[in-house]
Amino acid sequence: MGEAAHRYDETLPLEYRTQESRLNILGFWIFLGAEVALFATLFATYLVLFQRTGSGPTAGELFEVKDVLIETLLLLTSSFTCGLAIFEMRRGRISGLIAWLLVTLLLGVGFITFEIREFIHYVHEGATMQTSAFLSSFFVLVGTHGAHVSVGIGWMILIIIQLLQRGFTPKTARKVFIVSLYWHFLDVVWIFIFTLVYLLGMVI
């Protein structure tokens, strides 16, 4: 069993060449399924509480198109650069891989920076989690996504350090591929947030 787990298949991409790596990637897909359930619950809660604003501000009064578009542009662009990082990994170019991961990191940091500024602005406007059910569900949903992005940033930094220390191995390639799956998942979640939270809030 131990030999099978470490047996190489040279016909596959580096991150898939051992059974251990393939099982780890499969396990991460299962983990993402649990994350889908988490965010689906948060979205359902938000949509139920969306119009329960009490005496607090409504979504239309709070949300600003410019800031949301900047956040969206930063995160969706980071998904593209993360894809370029995987492309460079498949070509065996570690310098290109690290460069695109760093660009992805910077875009992610920019996204988090704008999101923190957005939250601070809302608090200054008197819109806090205690103001209404709508704002409680909003901060929990968007904040949970932001926390996931922050984890992804830290995770990517650790992987870059490992790449610099160990270079390309099936294990480091697997870690890069898994963190890219995580990052793309967060981008997909943001598309739903952008549509169901911000666009819907500005229209209704």
Image: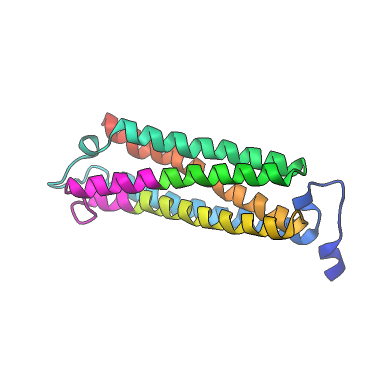
As drawn, is 192 to the left or to the right of 2? Answer: left
Image coordinates for residue 116, horizontal then vertical, percent: 34, 49
Residue pushed farthest left? 55
Q: Residue at x 65, y 42 (%)?
A: 85
| Magenta-colored span | 113-139
Image coordinates for residue 8, horizontal then vertical, percent: 86, 56
Q: Say how the picture is coloured.
A: rainbow
Q: Nearer the viewer, residue 23 or 18?
A: 18
Rendered-image quadrant of the C terminus: top left
Residue 42 shows in this picture: yes
Looking at the rendering, which quadrant does residue 184 occupy? top right
Image coordinates for residue 18, horizontal then vertical, percent: 80, 58
Image coordinates for residue 187, horizontal then vertical, percent: 50, 42
Residue pushed farthest bottom? 2
Q: Confirm whether the magenta stretch covers residue 128.
A: yes
As drawn, is 45 to the left or to the right of 162? Answer: left
Residue 134 shows in this picture: no
Q: Is residue 183 above or below residue 170?
A: above
Q: Nearer the viewer, residue 37 or 80?
A: 80
As drawn, is 126 to the left or to the right of 151? Answer: left
Q: Residue at x 68, y 56 (%)?
A: 164
